[in-house]
Amino acid sequence: MAANDAADVLARVAAAIEARRGADPAASYVASLLGANPDRLLKKIGEEATETVLAAKDGDKMHVIAEVADLWFHCLVLLARHGLGPDDVLRELARREGVSGHAEKASRGR
């Protein structure tokens, strides 16, 4: 899959997430994650990150892919919660491209 195709997939998933924003939380998983309690989404991201780490430790490439897809999906929901989307992250990655990781981290001052 070409890079543009991959970005298109992220954009389509983000659009689907936005389309479900106002849906009935009982009928839409995304709507339930975007509901009033942000801790539910944050806990889910932590769970998916842990599952990604465990899959990586097991070394099963297909399991790693599946868990990263779950993590990315939930991160896209988090971005939507904050009025952001994948293009915001892609722009930030483009800004960092070619910059030493050490230099980039130092520039953040954290």
Image (cartoon, rainbow, N blue to C red):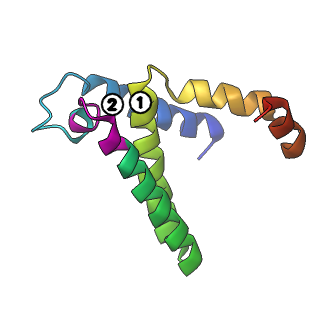
SS of the residue under disc 1: helix
Q: Categorize mark 2 by other alpha carbons within 10 Å: few (<14), some (14-19), many (20+).
A: many
Q: Amino acid at mark 2?
A: Ile
What secondary structure is the magenta-colored segment mainly?
helix
Q: Identify the image quadrant of residue 20.
A: top left
Residue 83 x/y as whole percent: 44, 19
Residue 94's tag is none
Q: Residue at x 15, y 34 (%)?
A: 25
Does 90 sit left or right of 43 as displayed?
right
Expressed as whole percent of the image width and height from the top left, the position of residue 14 reads 41, 30
> With respect to residue 55, does 27 lie above or below?
above
Q: Residue at x 52, y 66 (%)?
A: 64
> What residue would you read off at disc 1?
14
Which residue is located at x 49 percent, y 35 percent? 10
* Residue extent of the magenta highlight: 32-41
Does residue 99 appear to the left or right of 19 in the view shown?
right
